[in-house]
Amino acid sequence: MASEQPEYSYVAYIDEAGDPGLRRVRPRSNTGASEWFIVSAALIPADKEAETGQWIADIMAAMNSPQMQDIHFAKLTDNRKALACTMLAERHVRLFSVISNKQNMQGYKNPFAAQMTTLLPQDNWFYCWMTRILLERVTDFVVKNSIKKFNEIRADSR
């Protein structure tokens, strides 16, 4: 059976670090949520999607730590962080991050964003808003890349 090209052009792997809670934030509150909230995406061309497992295996092998089951960047030593970044920079991947120091958001309310989260708990508006900003950045890159390649916006930019 011949392998078919996927009907999509990119895969975005998205994850967050920190806690989106804003009621109590460290260090202002000892029992508060983490000071930073980060949402990131790794954007990979669809034709490279099958390679990502090998990328991770290669990075873990280079770290020479057989007990590691997965890569949690925050838990790595500085040397391993540098190694992971260097190896990832050699891959066909575009990285995006939205980072907020929540101390400047504490007490802020965004009723419009809160309205948009009617299917979620009302205190999730900050998570949704940060994710929206991230997806806008990813989408902007995909549009600009399509224009650069084809002189027009295409749904399929292969």
Image: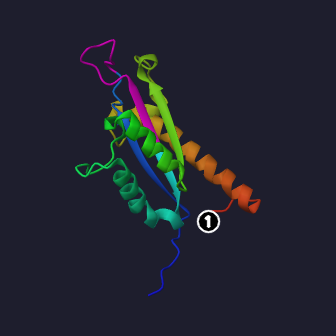
Q: Is residue 137 above or below residue 122?
A: below
Q: Where is residue 152 in the image (x, y as percent from the top left)?
A: 74, 59
Q: Where is residue 43 in the image (x, y as percent from the top left)?
A: 52, 52
| Residue of label 1 | 156
Pick the residue in front: 38 or 76.
76
Pick the residue in front: 113 or 88.
88
Residue 116 seen in this snapshot: no
Residue type at mark 1 is: Asp
At a point 45% along the width and 64% down the height, the residue shown is: 51
Q: In which quarter of the image is the N terminus?
A: bottom left
Q: Position of residue 109 (x, y in %)?
A: 44, 22
- 94 relative to 38 in the view: left or right: right
At a point 26% along the width and 14% down the height, the residue shown is: 30
At a point 35% along the width and 52% down the height, the residue shown is: 60
Q: Quadrant of the C terminus?
A: bottom right
Residue 29 seen in this snapshot: yes
Q: Which residue lies furthest to the top in this view?
A: 28
Asked if residue 94 is among those painted magenta in the image, a careful observer would answer: no
Q: Is residue 70 above or below residue 132?
A: below
Residue 25 location, quadrant: top left
Q: Give the range drawn in magenta.
A: 23-40
Q: Which structural element holds mark 1?
A: loop
Near mark 1 (Cα within 10 A), the count class, few <14, some 14-19 or many ≥20, is few
At a point 50% along the width and 40% down the height, the residue shown is: 132
Q: Where is residue 53 in the image (x, y as percent from the top left)?
A: 38, 61
Asked if residue 39 is among those painted magenta in the image, a careful observer would answer: yes
Residue 92 location, quadrant: bottom right
- 156 relative to 121 in the view: left or right: right
Pick the residue in front: 153 or 100.
100
Q: Main secondary structure of the magenta part?
A: loop
